[in-house]
Amino acid sequence: MNAAESSFADRLLGRVRLSGLLSLAAPLLAIVFAGVVTSIVLLISGDPPLETLGIMAEYGAQPRSIVLTLNYATTYYLAAIAVAIGFRMNLFNIGVDGQYRLAALVAAAVGGAVALPGPLHIAMIIVVAMLVGAGWASIAALLKVKRGVSEVISTIMLNAIATSLGAWLLNKERLAVEVAGSNNIGTKPIAESGQVPGMAIIPGTEAKVFGLIILAIVVGVIYHVLLNRTRFGFDLRATGRSETAAVASGVNVKRMIIVAMLLSGAAAGLIGMPQLLGSSYSYSLDFPTGLGFTGIAIALLGRNHPVGIAFGALLWAFLDTSSSILQLHEISPEIVLIMQGTIVLSVVIAYELVHRYQITAEQRRVSKELAGGASPRPEGASA
C-alpha cells in the first residue's frame, strides 16, 4: 500500500469512527436531556430530583426488581424487533399492537384446547401465534401492494378491528371460560405440557425470569444475520433507502413489501408468548396491552439495531419497574411517562441533528479537497 492509499484509508477509518461516536452520542444526549427535563418537572412539583432518581435506582437494583425488569424487557425487545423489521424498509407497521394481541388470543385458545407432548405443544402454540400475526399483517401488505393504501392508515384501522374481534372472541359463548376466584374471563388454561418454566438465575429472590428470554435472544440474532448477512437483507435495506434505485437493480419491491410485513407480523406474534407461556397460561381480560406502541419507541431509541434495541428495552423496563415505588414516597409515578416521552422526542431530534451534521461535514470535506486540488480517492484506487 503506497502513501496515498494509506492516507486515504486512515481518513476513511477516522470518518467511520467519528460516525460511530456521533451515532452513540445521540441516544446518550437524549437520555441526559430527558433527565434534565424530568428534573425541572420534579422541581416544579416540589419533589427533589436527585432523591427521586436515587429511590428509583435503589428499588430497581433489588433482586425481585431485576427479575421484573428482565421480564418486561423480554416482551419489549420482541415488540421493538417486530417494528424494526418494517422500519428498515421504511415501512411503518403501526399494527404490531393488534397483531400480537390477536395472535396471543388465538394461540392461547388453540393451546388450551389440545394436549401434546411438551416440546410439540410449546412449538405448536408459538407457530400458531406467528402465523396469526403474519396473517393479520398480510392484510395491510396486500392493501399497500394492490391498492396503494398507506400501511400507517391500514394498520391503525386493523388495530381497532383486532380489538373488536378479540372482544367478540373472548366471550363465554365462544372461547372464554370463567377464571377461578375472580370475575375475570379468559381462554381455557394451557396444560403443563405447553408451559415454559421460568429460570431462577437472580440470587436473593424466588421470582423467576421468563424462560422465553432465550427466544428473544435468538430472534435478535436472526434479525441481525438476516438483515446484515444475507442478500434478502441487503435488498430490504436498499428498498428502504431508495425504492427507485432498488427497482433499477432488479429488486421486486412489491414482493419485498409483502415479505417484510409478513416477517414483522410473525415477530409481532411472539410478543405475547413469554407472558402467555411463562406466567398467565391463558389469555384473559387483563392480558398486557399497548406493547406494540412501546416497541415503536424502543425501536427508535435503539435505531433499529439489535444491540441498541436491547439497551433501549432494558432502560424502558427499568423505568416501568421503578415507577411502582414512587407512589409510596408520595411522588407521582407519571413522572416516568414524562421521562419516556421526552426520551423518544429527544432521540428523534438528536438523530436528525447528527444526520445533518454528518452531511454538512462531508460536504465541507469534499469542498476542501477539491479546493486544494486533492482527489477524494487515492490515485490508482479502483472505482
Image (cartoon, grey):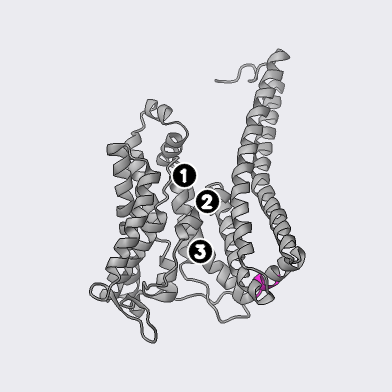
What secondary structure is marked by label 2? helix
* Spatial separation of the CA atoms under disc 2 and disc 3: 14 Å
Above or below 180: residue 331 = above
What secondary structure is marked by label 1? helix
Above or below 307: residue 350 = above
Rendered location of residue 120, percent (x, y): 31, 70
Q: Which badge, 2 or 3, comes first in the chain's sequence?
A: 3
User: Marks 1 and 2: in contact by CB < 8 Å?
Assistant: yes
Rendered location of residue 206, percent (x, y): 56, 82
Res 141 → quadrant: top left
Classify 10 Å Cα crowding around label 1: few (below 14), some (14-19), many (20 and above): many
Any mark on residue 366, and which? none
Q: Main secondary structure of the magenta part?
A: helix
Q: Closest to the observer: 372 or 92?
A: 92
What is the residue that sits farthest to the bottom in this orientation? 181
Q: Is residue 60 magenta?
A: yes
Query: What type is the residue that disc 1 sits on?
Result: Phe
Residue 82 falls left or right of residue 160: right
Query: What type is the residue that disc 2 sits on?
Result: Ala
- Mark yes or no: residue 124 visible: no
Q: Which residue is mark 2?
A: 299
* Spatial separation of the CA atoms under disc 3 and disc 1: 20 Å
Q: Which badge, 3 or 1, comes first in the chain's sequence?
A: 3
Extent of the magenta region: 58-62
